[in-house]
Image: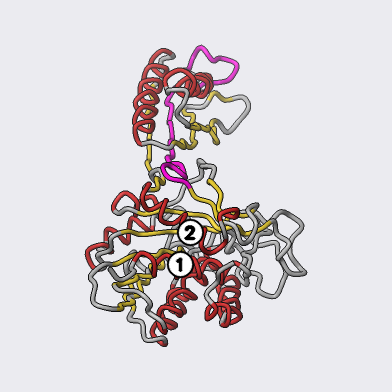
Amino acid sequence: MKLVEQIVDFHAELRDFRRDLHAHPELKFEEFRTADLIAERPGAWGIPVDRGLGGTGVVGIVKAGTSRRAIGLRADMDALPMTEFNRFAHASKHPGRMHACGHDGHVAMLLAAAKHFATQRNFDGTAYPVFQPAEEGGGGAREMIRDGLFEKFPMEAIFGMHNWPGLAAGQFALKAGPVMGSSTEFKVTIRGRGSHAALPHNGVDPVPVACQMVQAFQTIITRNKRPIEAAVLSVTMIHAGEATNVVPDTAEIQGTLRTFTVETIDLVEQRMRALVEHTAAAFGCTAELEFVRNYPPTINHAKETDFCREVMKDIVGEANVFDFEPTLGSEDFAYFLLEKPGCYVVIGNGEGAHREAGHGLGPCTLHNPNYDFNDELIPIGASYWVHLAERWLAPR
């Protein structure tokens, strides 16, 4: 494994920093302490920082040589609204908040790379370490773009990395094209007319209408969408009524849609609107559909993906670089890839054997209360960032 020796030397410092972040998690758009701690370090290393994009975002500016070329390297920094089950020393000190997705480790890896950049600067151009808020449902990437990220910091391409449990430490995976799905939420409100449950003919019952809609929605996936295109439409909530002997006035259906293409989202929305309108009318009800598009699909660019693959091979060897199996989980790095070329990759976090005494009994998987980031990844991931930037910005 070809790691940057200097990064290996200060691994312990960044490990302790990561664990401090883990113990003090902050939720989306509330990463004030986290942003302060992140900004302090580049400043101490002689790296200018810009703050406030997306609310709490931090961007480092590392210049070397005379070239106007530039690259962006992104780490997310928010935690999740969940209670941690681990009881080791660096477990969350704040019930209801937890770094259960490894964003604390992502910050540590990028800071380690930034510290190396500060002393070496073995490239010709500018590297922008981008510390992004609110990946977990807040669309922090979108907000940084709206605040002028790419205007203030012109860059040719931007790259992201996420830890991946189940893939061994020292391994990477990536793929060109769609790698993460879109995230869309929907809510259907069906309005009927309430009555006594013993006299249903005096009302218009919205509950069987909701049941018909739930079944009909699945025909969009099986009969309207092209079979070779991936999509999942999941109804996850149905709410109606307050008493067993009362037919309710209204019923609500809520759920999520995940796809790999915007065209499929468009198709599903069109068909859902038609089914909602006409199914309700057929039963004498009215209904409305709220269709909220959150994160778009994350689609890697081919040229940048090939570039990243070669960098990985140089660090860990070809045998430890795998093709990533796309998932319909979502990631707001997608917004960056709509604006700039780039690639989103994963780095192995192992199976959980790295967790110290006091961890919970459950698996070390993302968004699990027993999760913890594997600190052995810090020099590996940081070396990837360093080699990527130095190779991209190599003197021409």
User: Label 1 is placed on what type of residue?
Assistant: Trp
**Which residue, given by chain and number where applicable, does mark 2 sit on?**
161
Q: Where is residue 296 in the image (x, y as percent from the top left)?
A: 38, 44
Going 50% across and 70% down the picture, which residue do you hit?
382
- Secondary structure, mark 1, is helix
Asked whether the viewer can see residue 103, the reply is: yes
**Which residue, given by chain and number where applicable, does mark 1 sit on?**
385
Contact (Cβ within 8 Å) of mark 1 with mark 2: yes
Left or right, 1 with respect to 175, comes to: right
Going 73% across and 62% down the picture, which residue do you hit?
353
Q: Which of 1 and 325 is in front in this view?
A: 1
- Secondary structure, mark 2, is strand
Q: Is residue 6 magenta?
A: no
Q: Where is residue 246 in the image (x, y as percent from the top left)?
A: 57, 25
CA distance separating discs 1 and 2: 9 Å
Q: Is residue 184 magenta?
A: yes
Asked whether the viewer can see residue 194, the reply is: no
Residue extending furthest front?
396
Image: magenta residue range: 175-203
Going 49% across and 65% down the picture, which residue do you hit?
384
* Quarter of the N terminus within the rendering: bottom right
Q: Nearer the viewer, residue 357 or 64?
A: 64
